[in-house]
Amino acid sequence: MAKVIAGMTISLDGFVADQAGNASPLYPDLAARRGTDYRNALIEETGAVLMGRRTFEMGDPDSYVCSTPG
């Protein structure tokens, strides 16, 4: 049987993004984690990624499933 893991990053005051829709302050180390053993292991364990439209449009959706940048 498959396992479902849900996660979401929010600020302490309950916001996911600022008034301009920018969520990058919540992910200051996201670019630094690309290609790391930690991130690659998470990608290997992931069968599917479900995201909203704004998250999809925010960046490169393939970065959620590709273990190497690009």
Image (cartoon, rainbow, N blue to C red):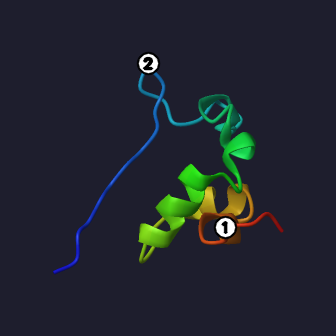
Residue 46: x %, y % from top left: 43, 70
Q: Which mark is residue 3?
A: none
8 vs 37, nearest the viewer: 37
The residue sitting at 42% across, 69% down in the picture is: 45
65 vs 67, nearest the viewer: 67
Q: Quadrant of residue 57?
A: bottom right
The residue sitting at 74% across, 45% down in the picture is: 31
Asked if residue 7 can be seen in this view, the reply is: yes
Residue 43: x %, y % from top left: 52, 66
Most distant residue in the left direction? 1
Amino acid type at mark 2: Asp
Local packing at callout 2 (Cα closer than 10 Å; few below 14, some 14-19, many 20+) is few
Q: Quadrant of residue 37?
A: bottom right
The residue sitting at 60% across, 71% down in the picture is: 65
Local packing at callout 1 (Cα closer than 10 Å; few below 14, some 14-19, many 20+) is some
Q: Quick one: SS at disc 1?
A: loop
Q: How many marks?
A: 2
Residue 5: x %, y % from top left: 30, 59
Q: CA distance from mark 1 to mark 2?
A: 32 Å
> Dots 1 and 2: beta carbons under 8 Å?
no
Most distant residue in the front direction? 37
The residue sitting at 46% across, 33% down in the picture is: 10
Asked if residue 52 can be seen in this view, the reply is: no
Report which residue position mark 2 lands on.
13
> Would you say 46 lies left or right of 36 here?
left
Report which residue position mark 1 lands on.
67
Query: Which quadrant does the N terminus fall into?
Result: bottom left
Image height check: is 1 above or below 68?
Answer: below
User: Which of pointers 1 and 2 lies earlier in the amino acid sequence?
Assistant: 2
